[in-house]
């Protein structure tokens, strides 16, 4: 199966963010995004401004029978739950989407690629189940909601920025638990939910899947994203054939090369060396080095909502610096691990 999507191929050496930022002011957040990732800016969510912009709270906005309070907690009216009900606020006017609206206003004249994200159905379904909804109903609602929101978000963005090349990511940290014993749904059900949400928009957007937790890479790829976003981890090098096949079918890797859960240092050297060693391992196991270099994007491991603004600045500066080195390497191979 080809992963080719409409629109021109993304340029090499891109960097981008993962969505959530620590800013309170939407204008400052958008300026931050455009300054640090001008080639592939990512619409921010701002949970520090409003808890309704948190990952789960934003995903639950507009679901029949679910309300979100000022602290971002979900409250369930079981009698009003309806898996076939239309999603409310498909124009993204509510308090959960202030960051998105500010971003789209700022990039209204953009011609190049831009990135937006929404929470995936496995992560949303698990949150609904933990809020008290029966598992089967929770994941059924989540699948319907994410398909509707993905379609609405794509249509909304392309109305606001019609000349842009749209990249839409599903954020699925819970997909890392999909193969664990006792997870509320089977892996095959989870794959169907995520692939169904991506399929809704793949004709008009470049689709991506972000999973910042340890996961079964084969399951992640099986849902059919054009871009797979995963952290830089040593175990990736054991799956060179799997990643090589994905890239050869037109896939891209978004490497979470800058940690967001611990110290990152103040220079790019260690981060680049870690990525380069991973790349060399993949190449030595048969992955095409030119393809790997040309089809890689650099990101932080996860969002930056838990960081201060100064820390977020450093993370994104390092992300850009790693991407610049990658872009220079794309003119020649193999990976150099020197600094």
Image: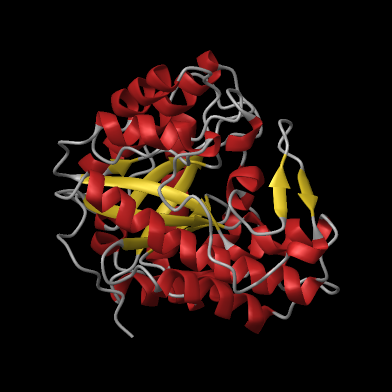
Residue at x 53%, y 18% (from the top left corner) = 24
Depth check, front residue: 145 or 107: 145
Q: Give the vertical position of 249 relative to 85 (above or below).
A: below
Residue 142: image x %, image y %? Answer: 63, 66
Residue at x 28%, y 31% (from the top left corner) = 105
Residue 53 as seen in the image, left or right of residue 318: right
Residue 279 as seen in the image, left or right of residue 174: left
Residue at x 65%, y 47% (from the top left corner) = 56
Residue 143: image x %, image y %? Answer: 59, 70
Q: Quadrant of residue 293?
A: bottom left
Residue at x 30%, y 49% (from the top left corner) = 157
- Report the quarter where the N terminus lies: bottom left
Which color scheme does this rendered protein use?
secondary structure
Residue 75, visible in the rendered structure: yes
Q: Quadrant of residue 93?
A: top left
Depth check, front residue: 44 or 177: 44
Residue 222 as seen in the image, left or right of residue 189: left
Q: Give the vertical position of 308 relative to 63 (above or below).
A: above
- Report the quarter where the C terminus lies: top left
Residue 281: image x %, image y %? Answer: 46, 60
Residue 339, visible in the rendered structure: no
Depth check, front residue: 255 or 5: 5
Residue 205: image x %, image y %? Answer: 29, 62
Q: Give the vertical position of 140 relative to 212 (above or below).
A: below
Residue 42 as seen in the image, left or right of residue 148: left
């Amino acid at each position: 199966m080809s992963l080719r999507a409409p629109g021109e191929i993304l340029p090499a050496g891109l960097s981008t963010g993962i969505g959530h930022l620590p800013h309170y002011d939407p204008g400052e957040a958008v300026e931050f995004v455009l300054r640090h990732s001008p080639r592939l800016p990512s619409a921010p969510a701002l949970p520090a401004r409003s808890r309704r912009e948190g990952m789960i709270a934003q995903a639950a906005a507009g679901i029949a029978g679910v309300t979100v309070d000022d602290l971002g907690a979900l409250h369930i009216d079981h009698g009003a739950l309806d898996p076939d009900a239309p999603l409310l606020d498909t124009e993204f006017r509510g308090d959960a989407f202030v960051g998105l609206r500010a971003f789209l206003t700022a990039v209204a004249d953009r011609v190049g690629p831009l990135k937006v994200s929404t929470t995936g159905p496995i992560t949303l379904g698990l949150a609904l189940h933990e809020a008290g909804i029966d598992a089967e109903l929770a994941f059924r609602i989540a699948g319907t909601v994410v398909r509707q929101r993905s379609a609405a978000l794509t249509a909304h963005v392309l109305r606001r920025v019609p000349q842009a090349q749209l990249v839409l990511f599903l954020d699925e940290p819970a997909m890392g638990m999909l193969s664990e014993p006792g997870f509320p749904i089977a892996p095959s059900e989870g794959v169907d939910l995520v692939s169904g949400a991506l399929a809704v928009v793949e004709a008009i957007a470049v689709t991506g899947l972000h999973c910042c937790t340890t996961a079964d890479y084969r399951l992640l790829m099986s849902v059919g994203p054009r871009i797979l976003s995963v952290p830089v981890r040593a175990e990736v090098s054991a799956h060179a054939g799997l990643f090589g096949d994905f890239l050869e079918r037109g896939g891209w890797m978004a490497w979470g090369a800058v940690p967001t859960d611990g110290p990152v240092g103040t220079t790019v050297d260690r981060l680049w060396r870690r990525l380069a060693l991973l790349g060399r391992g993949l190449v030595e196991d048969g992955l095409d080095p030119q393809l790997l270099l040309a089809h890689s994007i650099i990101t932080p491991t996860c969002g930056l909502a838990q960081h201060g603004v100064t820390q977020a600045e450093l993370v994104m500066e390092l992300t850009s610096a790693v991407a610049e080195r990658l872009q220079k390497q794309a003119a020649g191979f193999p990976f150099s691990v020197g600094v």
